[in-house]
Image (cartoon, rainbow, N blue to C red):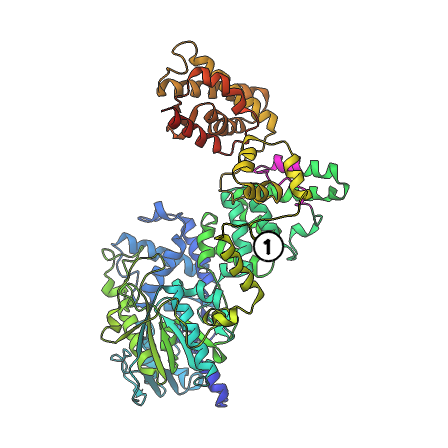
Amino acid sequence: MRRAAAARANESGLQILTLPNLAARLAGGFRSLVPSEQLDRAIQQALAAGGFKEIEKVRHLPGMTRAVSRALRKVWDADVSLRADATNARLADLALIENRVRRELPLAAALPIDLRDAALSRLLHAARTIGPLMIDRLSWIPPLWRPLIDALAKEVPVEWIASPHAETAWFAGRIVRAPEMENAAPAAVSCADPHHEVIESLRWARYLIASGTAHPDQIAIVSAGTAPWDDHFRALAPDAGFRLAFPHGIPALSTRDGQRCAALADVLQHGLNQQRLRRLVSLCRGERSAFERLPANWLAALPRGATLSRPEEWRRAISAAATSDASLAGAADALPIVDILARGISAAAEAAVLVLHGRALQLWQSALRSAPPEAIELSLRTSRFESDHDPADSVVWCSARELATSPRPYVRLLGLTDRHWPRRQGNDSVVPDHVLSSAIVDVDPVAEADRRHFRIIVEAATGRAVLSRGRRSAQGGRVGRSLLSEGQPEEHLSRTRVPEHAWNEADRIMARPQDAAEIGQVRSADACWRDWHLERFTPHDGKFDAEHPVVVRSIERVQSATSLRRMLRDPLGFVWRYALGWNAPRDREQPLTILPDEFGKLVHELLRRAVDALEPVPGYARASDAEIETAVADASSAVRDAVAAAGTDAAGAAMAQHRGLRGIVGSRGIAAQGDNGRGHPKLDRSTVRPTERRRHGAATAVGSDHSGHNTRDARQARWLHR
């Protein structure tokens, strides 16, 4: 914002620098502060070298690079020398890492403490290289840079434009206070939850712009920490009709490039299957990836129900598709890609070069530099891209720390609850209190910083300040008011209220039912909802033409027990499932890729062996639960060994055994109920009489599609016999 103000005021020749850039300018020699990515990479190499006293056992853990980087920055900001206390093993480890990092850095990159010392050694050039210095609205300066500021004050004029709440007691130069102004008391509102807070803040900002009260560059939405609201703003802001800038960066996973990286991480970490690979291919389409060389419809030719969790299964499926369609011969080029993806997270770097491109590839490589490949999901979750809009001409959504250095006249503060503002901070994971007191290393505690930023932002809001909080957290728990907003009368905002100003078209329509009634889709949805509660048949009850070919084909197919039952009990559900092909979302357990006849042979062999083991003594009807479980376990082992010897997949046999017990065995009077802890289903003996079991057994087993309904029917049968 200061650069935009200088450009508007035509302040030619003004240099706007951060404190590290100020030190780098004075140090000369093209030196600069080490970038975060370069520092993380150097720390990663230092940890890999080993030889530590205390952190040796945890140096390979995911997140260790980030934790060490955070600890070193806190130590450097506090201007604490790690070499001063050689008796403390933890500090000695940190000093060793610091020395290794210093050796790994290129000559032009410097650690903060080294850059400060280099600048102090060249103070005699301050008059020519720096000139008059103005510290513009910083509320706090780390102790690391204070000696440099004090030394510069003796060489060149230094003044600090500071808020009354800024920490300036140590500063020996001239302090300039902003003129005090009479501000209206801030308004306090309570919303349902963080999502509702975002909606109300967008309504508020749009009203200020539409009414001409404020320009976008005069409006700010702020919170102590932005994480709970970032995703909501990313999802809702594009419909608001004004630009919203994220100075702290956009969450990478909220972008398409981030989702490409997430899809690749899902395949590498959680295993290869068709569903995950289809998602990866769809996201990488048109991005100059290795998938672009494949035929356009190669995935459409693969069977949807097949898991394809191994390269051999992909090879068989692609060969079968190419045999039936000659245009798919080029699909075999996907097999080398599948082989690499099947290697898992160890192939993270190689797989990324094949399927990612541009910004997505840069994000992936940056995430690998900041943490081990096994923690790639955590790294992606914390990664950010630059904002799409410039804060100089946009409404800003940012943290209180960022806004305190450039306050705006119209501001809405979110998250003023007892949990979030001020925030609580625990011990540092690398430098806890027993290693180095927080009074020494944590020179600007987060709670004190939040209070200071709150006072600065509210007092600078010459237009209007609104204090907002959620009555419940994002998880649904009740939260109380922050101590910073107590004493202010609070307005209760309902989620269903009619707003004074809508934030998008949908919000306007919801607030005006008479306008919504004029929209065709809304009228159709309303009619569908009303017809659903009528006893008579309506156009929304699934009516279709007589002899409709789709329905005729679904009826003429060979019916299973489940499809027949659904046809008689739920005709509309039958049409949805078997005519239109609509399926319920699948869970993460993947279906078995085995031919139906082979599946039936496995299950019936398991049943035969289990029943033969129980007959004639003690008898299936008289056997105890323990005897049934033992018989099933023995039969499972025998079937698994026989199938493995025949060359069929043993894991497939085990899955067939499990699904068979859930379906066919349940329909014959044995119901699967959980797991007995030994890898086999826990079984309950049915009370169906042996004669009834013999009479109905064959009929209940034929045609079952093993969907789980047979188990329910067996339980109902036991209840009826009782």
Image position, residue 495 (x, y; %): 38, 66
Figure quadrant of the C terminus? top left
Along the viewing direction, whichever of 231 and 425 lies nearer the viewer: 231
Residue type at numbered disc 1: Leu
Q: Residue furthest right?
A: 326
Q: Main secondary structure of the magenta part?
A: loop
Q: Is residue 529 magenta?
A: no
Q: Residue at x 42, y 59 (%)?
A: 101
Q: Does residue 624 sit above or below 131 in this rendering? A: above
Q: Residue at x 51, y 48 (%)?
A: 266
Q: Is residue 552 visible?
A: yes
Left or right: residue 581 compared with residue 198: right
- The local secondary structure at tag 1 comes to helix
The segment highlighted magenta reads 298-317
Figure quadrant of the N terminus? bottom left
Image position, residue 447 (x, y; %): 27, 67
Q: Residue at x 43, y 49 (%)?
A: 48
Q: Is residue 308 magenta?
A: yes
Marker count (numbered): 1
Q: Does residue 13 sit above or below 514 in this rendering? A: below
Res. 454 image quadrant: bottom left
Left or right: residue 276 compared with residue 673: right
Image position, residue 702 (x, y; %): 56, 25
Question: Pointer 1: what residue?
Answer: 283
Q: Does residue 672 sit above or below 577 in this rendering? A: above
Q: Is residue 592 visible?
A: no
Q: Residue furthest front?
A: 536
Left or right: residue 430 compared with residue 41: left
